Amino acid sequence: EALKGLGEHVEVPGFRKGAAPYDVLARHLKGEAKIYEEALQRIVGRTLEAEIRKRNVDVAGEPNISVTKMVPPFGVSYKAVLTLLPSVTLGDVSNIKLEKKEAKAADQEVERVINNLREMRAKEASVGRAAQGGDRVVLDIEVRRDGVVIENGTSKDFPLILGEGRFIPGFEEQIIGLKAGDTKEFELTFPDEYYEKSLAGKPAAFSVLVKQVFERTLPALDDAFAKDLGHSQTAEDLKKQIRESVQFEKEREEEERFEMAAMDELVKRSTFGEIPEQLVTGEAQKMLAELEQNVVRQGMKFDDYLASIRKSKEDLTREFRPQ
């Protein structure tokens, strides 16, 4: 069967498709490995489903197949590792009461998105003056504890926009007032909630060299800016589209909050078996795909939507995993 199936899709000189003898086709395929592989797929497809039904289990995703014996014509043995759906015992749901909140795009949220878009199109010019808020600086940084450079504690050509607060508290204030070519040493304490647990709440010595200072000029929020973005003819149209985008995001967040609140109440009343990692990953990717479809149905490009909320597909997938 495998030979026939492969032969129908392989051109062998001197033979019609599907008519080449076994040994000729094997030579053409540079050995029998592809024939055996095709045969194994057919064997697994024919036998595994019956075994799953016999065991009366619910399977999630694709099985992991490993061959334990394959000695044609004497037989084949294989092992299939299956991801099982968790068992669920539902509790009493009759007394769950929840309320949906009104979702509304706040003016300051719309302004923040607009400012983000302007920031993305800021023009930069190298300056010789001291760095100030809003400038972009390029730094060489070295971080030491007890006189020793910490792991990954050296950064070359590190870009930083002063005022965005993306580094540890107090760092940007140390840079303001320095010019290109200036060096400075100072001490700061990492926040208690710092992601690198070995540094959280610990003091460290910083050595900084300012290599460049760029003054950033943001474009005016006018019709020309709206046209440059490619989706609006006027600034008012742009504001309207952004408000609709933010409103859509707020409604999505409230819908998710409501659903998760319902799920939380349901979980409290129910018992579950172990939830496999494969299911979590698959569900997170499914949620991302559903979100993208909803955004497109709203008439927006998904890339524009991601830019407006300053998140990537990977960011959203990570956020979906706990849900």
Image (cartoon, rainbow, N blue to C red):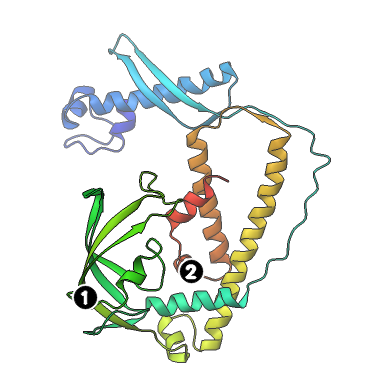
Residue 307 is drawn in which quadrant?
bottom left
Residue 128 is drawn in which quadrant?
bottom left
Amino acid under disc 1:
Gln
Is 179 positioned to the left or the right of 120 in the image? left
Judge by depth and name the residue closer to the eye, 311 or 238. 311
Residue tagged by mark 1? 212
In the orientation shown, which residue stands out farthest toward the top?
74
Q: Position of residue 60 (x, y in %)?
A: 52, 32
> The N terminus is located in which quarter?
top left
Element at badge 1? strand
In the orientation shown, which residue stands out farthest toward the right?
95
Tag 1: Cα neighbours inside 10 Å, few (<14), some, or many (≥20)? some
Amino acid under disc 2:
Lys
Is 178 positioned to the left or the right of 316 in the image? left
Residue tagged by mark 2? 301
Q: Position of residue 116 (x, y in %)?
A: 45, 75
Q: Report how many numbered discs are placed on residues in the image.
A: 2
